[in-house]
Amino acid sequence: MPMAADEIAAMIRSALPDAEVEITDLAGDGDHYAARVTSAAFAGLSRVRQHQAVYAALGGRMGGVLHALQLTTAAPKG
């Protein structure tokens, strides 16, 4: 069963509490999503490690859920 956009966002926020997550349904079918994730937790991580963090947050299901992923490092809040 496909994941809903709000479920995807919640899973990412659970693993990266400071993350700002924007999910877009690419095809309007609830099965092809793009995500834009901004997190201070990405600071100092390589692009590969950033993607791995999101992949892990989704329990390894990113390939069947997200078809596009944009990651941005946010300035730490303080």
Image (tube, grey):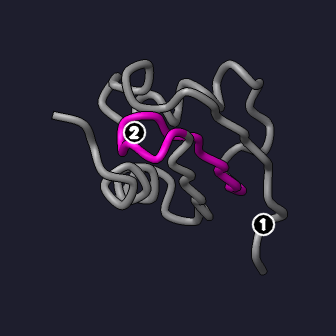
Measured along the vertical axis of the image, is residue 42 above or below residue 77?
Answer: above
Q: Where is residue 52 drawn, in percent x and y? A: 54, 24
Q: Of circles 1 and 2, which is in front?
A: 2
Give the magenta part as a residue range: 27-40
Amino acid type assigned to the residue bearing label 1 in the image: Pro
Neighbourhood count class around disc 1 (C-alpha, 10 Å): few under 14, some 14–19, many 20 upward: few
Q: For residue 57, which numbered disc appears in the image? A: 2
The residue at which mark 1 appears reads as: 76
Name the residue located 39 percent from the left edge and 54 percent from the top edge. 5
Tell me which amino acid carries mark 2.
Ala
Quadrant of image for the N terminus? top left
User: What's the CA distance linking mark 1 and mark 2?
Assistant: 20 Å
Name above or below for residue 28 compared with residue 18.
above
Residue at 56% across, 52% down: 24
Residue 37 is inside the magenta segment: yes
* Left or right: 15 in relation to 77: left
Q: Secondary structure at mark 2?
A: helix
